[in-house]
Amino acid sequence: MVDATRTVGVEEELLLVDPDQRTLSGRSGAVLREHAEAGAHAPRSASDDLDHELFLHQLETRTDPATPLEEIHRQLAAARRAATEAARAEGLAVMASGFVPMPFEPRVSPNDRYRAMVELFGETARTGSTCGTHVHVAISSPEEGVGVIDRIVPWLPLLVAIGANSPFAEGRDTKYASWRSQAWSRWPSAGPTEAFGSLAAYEESSRLLKMTGAARDDGMLYYDARLSVGQPTVEVRVLDVCTDLADAVLAAALVRGLVETAAERWAEGRPLSRWRAEILRASHWRAARMGLTDTLVDPVLQELRPAREVLERLVRYVQPRLEAAGDLERVEEGIDRVLRAGGATRQRAAYERTGSIDGVVDDLVERTEAAWALGE
């Protein structure tokens, strides 16, 4: 008996830019004030809200939990519209890219926690201007959540490849499809985790990470998949922020399919496929380096296979859950779309077309705005 389709929620991190100078803008405080004043008397939902992030050139948006992916798409579009309109009022624009493509000098948000992070982690924090898409899927208990995390970790590099949207950094092509993944991996608590086996083991590992100082608090447990802080969800954190909202919704569908499939297998007591941490890291690295343009590690065969073949295996693996949610056609179309031209490919195409990083920035700003305009 298949249980009900679970709710899903999505958080996005976005960049603030001066569209005329093609530079980052550290004026998130002014944008947030403008947004608060413009919506002071309006009904509030999560997608109406904007928040600050580690740096003054970043904004964060979020959705309420929902089951239909059409509703997630609508909320993501509404959140981007809110961010864009508040930015415009300050002469700025919003851009969705996993990493800053042009040279920049970061300014830390005036928040005691963020300043302490930069003080402790130094250049790892100061230069870590990454923007991700975080997908939350409901769980029935923390014990189920750990069982899910243990079972989805080998599949998460495929999501890295699907969402790869950060080939440029400091004005140069990094040769990676997802440079964000490499920058993010510098954090000592970030990355894939070997199977915990139990909630007690998860909590003990987390305690030890905090004891060493690698994580200041639970919010800094940057596992690829973790128990969310303060919410009954598993949170998957491996994706670059997607310029095109259809890619973000594709990711949400696949993450939910993986979580629901893993929860079933955990409840049935099926044995784990155990992977060593160094192999998980290598699989993640290959996905970040190649994106969808080459071979990826097949989580079942544990060998390199063409990207399309591995993604088709992922879809087959979660197909019963995609069918139950009515998401199968959306996912199949989405897989074809990103294989033709994912985020990194589209950024590089903008560079080839214009011959400059300025052209990449212009394209990202235009497509970020078009994504919410089309999503309404």
Image (cartoon, rainbow, N blue to C red):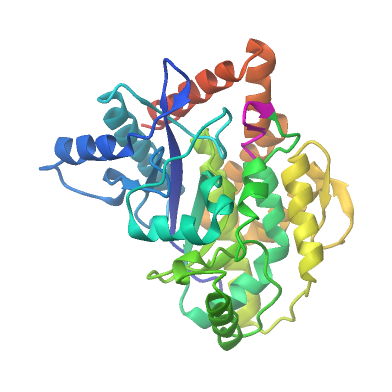
The vertical placement of 342 against 350, above or below, is below
Quarter of the picture containing the N terminus is bottom right
The image position of residue 299, as x and y in percent, is 79, 61
Q: Magenta stretch?
A: 164-172
Q: Quadrant of residue 203?
A: bottom right
Residue at 25% in and 50% down: 45
Image quadrant assignment for residue 359: top right
Give the camera-side residue of 89 and 41: 89
Q: Magenta segment: does it hold 41?
A: no
Q: Which residue lies furthest to the top in this view?
A: 354
Q: Position of residue 311 (x, y in %)?
A: 74, 48
Residue 227 seen by the camera: yes
Query: Residue furthest toward the left?
Result: 41
Q: Which residue is drawn at 57% across and 69% down?
A: 214
Q: Is residue 310 left or right of residue 41?
A: right
Which residue lies at the image location 77% right of the left edge and 74% below the top edge?
Answer: 273
Could you say which is closer to the camera, residue 361 or residue 155? 361
